[in-house]
Amino acid sequence: MATLLLHANGTYRAHWADRLGFCKGAGAPLAFRCIKSNGGPIPMTLVGVTRIYPILYRERLSSGDSIVRSERMEMKIRRLYNQRRSLVIDGAVSEFQWSTKDFHLSNDSDSEEGAKISKLLEMSAEPEVLMAEMSPEQLNSFAAYRSKLELTRQSDMGKSIEKALQDAGLTEREVTAFMRARVVGLKRKTYHGKCSHEEGFITIWNILYNIENGKSSSSKYVKWMKNE
């Protein structure tokens, strides 16, 4: 079943004979004084920025709550977090290497010959001489076995590190940077109505992502709050 959802902030008056359908361009800027707090997304408006506040960071915790920090405090928390992760990762890697000294693949038909060659080379006093006497097929089997063995080791070690971090409560943090600004509503030069300067605040989310990627903040990243 098709539905049509209309928002107060994105609805404009139109002539009764205007053609219905998809609008190719945005409508006229919505006056700042006409913005409704619960009116949905704002296609376009005109504001002047009177003050920009420092960037803040909101972290969503595993409990579902969130905490807001200043940039200085976020850098401190991030440094401590990375230090703890490094210690846990180093410990997990050392434990994995110690417990898999004699790590071998299961003896399937593809790697059985390569495993035998690897065992012979480990027991040989002169492995270079032994490899020089091998046939191309034997060398290919050995190379394929070593490659598969390394991939399996890396995969298992990654799982061990991930489990260690999870047990230590050091999974990836969910942090979003945002910035607030005080703004004042502007009017077109052709506007001759009553002049009243409406003020309010805007909150721009994912501000660092937009700056690093050279993008302007779209409406889905901007939250408005007018002064009543």
Image: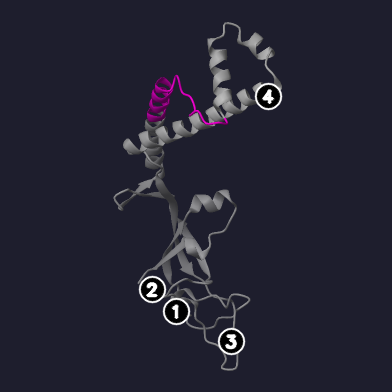
- Of tags 2 and 3, the one toward the viewer is 3
Q: Which residue is mark 4?
A: 137
Q: Which residue is mark 1?
A: 8
Q: Residue at x 54, y 22 (%)?
A: 115
* Mark 3: secondary structure: loop
Q: Is residue 13 magenta?
A: no
Q: Which residue is mark 2?
A: 38
| Disc 4 residue crowd, few under 14, some 14–19, many 20+, Cα 10 Å | few
Residues at circles 4 and 1 in contact by the CB criterion of under 8 Å: no
Toward the top, the furthest residue is 125
Q: Earlier in the sequence, mark 4 or mark 2?
A: 2
- How far apart marks 4 and 3 lie (CA) works out to 72 Å
- Of tags 4 and 2, the one toward the viewer is 4
Q: Earlier in the sequence, mark 1 or mark 3?
A: 1
Q: Label 2 amino acid? A: Asn
> In this view of the protein, which residue sits in the foreground, 194 or 85?
85
Left or right: 91 as drawn, with respect to 222: left
- Label ID, residue 20: 3
